[in-house]
Image (cartoon, grey):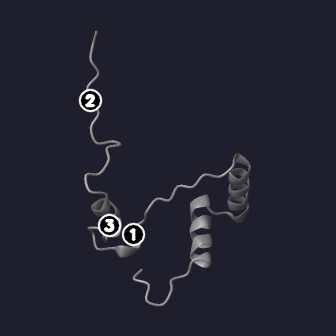
Amino acid sequence: MSKRPARKGFASRPADPDQWIRAADAPPRNGDAGGFTARLTINVTPELRGRIKIAAFRRGVTVADMLRDLFAREFPPTQGDPS
């Protein structure tokens, strides 16, 4: 019976969750703050996903670009916002 090697690091939990959360706010190492992105995952119905994809296709943009523009319009920076 062969033993499977232990998997390390792929889905391990951070030792310090507060440090892990703040790390996402750190600027990228190359100094280009505009190049930093964070992933956002949401659950939508298959029907809504289809409507979103069709709308993006009709507009000639990617779903990601369309949603980024939507979020930027709906959630503009506020006065004193550090971003």
Closer to the camera, 45 or 60? 45
Q: Residue pushed farthest bottom?
A: 79
Packing grade of label 1 (10 A; few <14, some 14-19, many >=20) is few
| Residue at the (57%, 61%) spot, across then down | 64
Task: Please say if the residues under marks 3 and 2 sit with CB atoms less than 8 Å apart.
Answer: no
- Is 25 rendered above or below residue 20? below
Residue behind mark 3? 22
Residue 6 is tagged as 2
How far is disc 1 from disc 3 in space, using C-alphas? 18 Å
Q: Position of residue 31 (x, y in %)?
A: 28, 74
| Residue at the (39%, 69%) spot, across then down | 35
Q: Given this view, does label 1 or label 2 mark the residue nearer the observer?
A: 2
Packing grade of label 3 (10 A; few <14, some 14-19, many >=20) is few
Q: Quadrant of the C terminus?
A: bottom left
Q: Position of residue 81 (x, y in %)?
A: 44, 84
How far is disc 3 from disc 2 in space, using C-alphas? 29 Å
Looking at the rendered structure, the kind of residue marked 1 is: Gly
Residue behind mark 1? 35
- Is 29 rendered above or below residue 74? above
| Residue at the (62%, 66%) spot, across then down | 66
